[in-house]
Image (cartoon, rainbow, N blue to C red):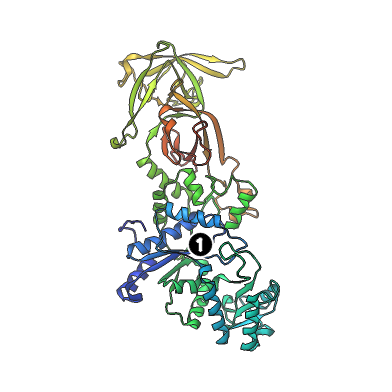
Amino acid sequence: MSATDSSAPSNFIRHIIATDLANHKNQGKVATRFPPEPNGYLHIGHAKSICLNFTLAIENQGTCNLRFDDTNPEKESIEYMESIERDVLWLGFTWAAKYHASDYFEQLYDYAIQLIKQGDAYVDSSSPEQIRADRGTLTEPGKESPDRQRSIAENLDLFTRMRAGEFADGAYVLRAKIDMTSPNVNMRDPTIYRIRRVHHQRTGNDWCLYPMYDYTHCISDALEGITHSICTLEFEDHRPLYDWVLDKLQTPCHPQQIEFARLQLEYTIVSKRKLLQLVTEKHVNGWSDPRMPTISGLRRAGFTPEAIRNFCERIGVTKKDSWIEMGVLENCIRENLNEHAPRAMAVLKPLRVVISNWETDKTETYQIANHPQKPELGSREVTFSNTIFIEQDDFAENPPKDFKRLTTGSEVRLRGSYVIKCDEVIKDAEGNVIALHCSYDPATLGKNPEGRKVKGVIHWVSAAHSFTAELRLYDRLFSHPNPDTLDNFLDGLNPNSLEILSDCRLEASLATATPDTRYQFERTGYFCVDSEDSTPEKPVFNRTVTLRDSWVK
């Protein structure tokens, strides 16, 4: 596991662990785990859980395991497992041990036999629909199944034959025998095993009998010696079942389940089902689309592990659900990249500028600092020639009030170079501006012009010393702050979440940029080399975030 900041703010879980350690509970040990189901790619909500579980272990010289809860093979795959491992490592954490719930299938089965022998579980032939109907409501008690009174011998016989594959899928389930009148619906004889003839990604066809999550999870925690089983608030009502199973089985270790509020981030969704729908219906270009809230999508967009860890620490850990503004996450990456990303110049929508009083074949090369406050980041060469490109938006024939860029007859400074003046505007047959003829003041390299003040500074690239690249301007995937509240969450999709610019011109130093390298394109935003589509022949850069929040309310 990686190091963490020991000055991190406290929270109620840190207080619980500190108290346990002071009382020498669990022999003074702290053991946590991150237990994802491998049925999709991890998202920003999982990042909060990863950071919490691993950081708590690191802070207390403990251990944190990675465990795949792979008990539902219909929706799980090796691909998802591999992506989860990549994401955890990328975030900067290393697990003490890696497990799968399927590692415990035999032990889980033996524990189920124990429950049956104790009279704490029974085989039920009721259909799923009947079980749901008999479970009751929050205000009405449940109804006992006619099979609840089966003898222990008959239950053992049927359960053994269920494992042997004698019965069709759904013919029987194994239920815990608890209390059909419990005010907690989760305690009304929950199903703990069901028959499923599905090929498992790790155990193949060895099993046609799979345990349910609530039964599997607590036993897996106990078998691994977990001390603090940390999960989100939706499992709070499941905690009595967690404790019931471990109490009935008298496991040598009884972890403490602690719940915290899950991450609710505006302008996004974190439902795996809905994320999968976005992918399968091609509203996005796969799980790693930079607009997705997946960790792989954030990584491809240019987010850094440090920014995500900082975000997770900044939003804190509470017992109360609350909404986090997307701007909090975006500001974390802005702060990180402003500190660490080298600067460069890129012209997104080029306008050709010919320097009429500059010799055609003459060039000058300047050294420009890669970061204005970080001399240790060095500098790069930028070449000036008689033809350059500037942004189309940096020129206006009829400028608005307080326009501080280039207009006909006015001057502007080129970043790190000379002051130029627009002398002539070249237009096509339709009246569109296609080029400018400008003159430069040779006395203004690194100096202010004498007798006049130039207010504006714009970026530029040399036509002969730049290259063409594709820039993808990503924005928030949803334009509605809470798409989950809509009748159809797809109605909240942002139609302007991606703009592709295929003829951008980038300064020559960027030609050797490698995938995942991040930059601040001056006056434009933060960008990174696309890790999947960029090639030396066709470079692609993704916008991570704009320089300023354009979504401020």
Residue 331 horizontal/vertical position (percent): 42, 46
Q: What element carries label 1?
A: loop
Looking at the image, residue 209 lies above or below residue 445 = below
Identity of the residue drawn at 58% across and 71% down: 212
Foreground pick, 237 / 296: 296
Foreground pick, 168 / 461: 168
Image quadrant holding the N terminus, namely bottom left
Residue 527 horizontal/vertical position (percent): 45, 38
Residue 549 horizontal/vertical position (percent): 46, 42
- Count of labels in the image: 1
Outermost left residue: 375
Foreground pick, 154 / 27: 154
Q: Name the residue under label 1.
A: 36
Looking at the image, residue 26 lies above or below residue 403 = below
Based on the displayed image, in which of its 4 quarters is residue 61 positioned? Answer: bottom left
* Residue 123 located left or right of residue 452: right
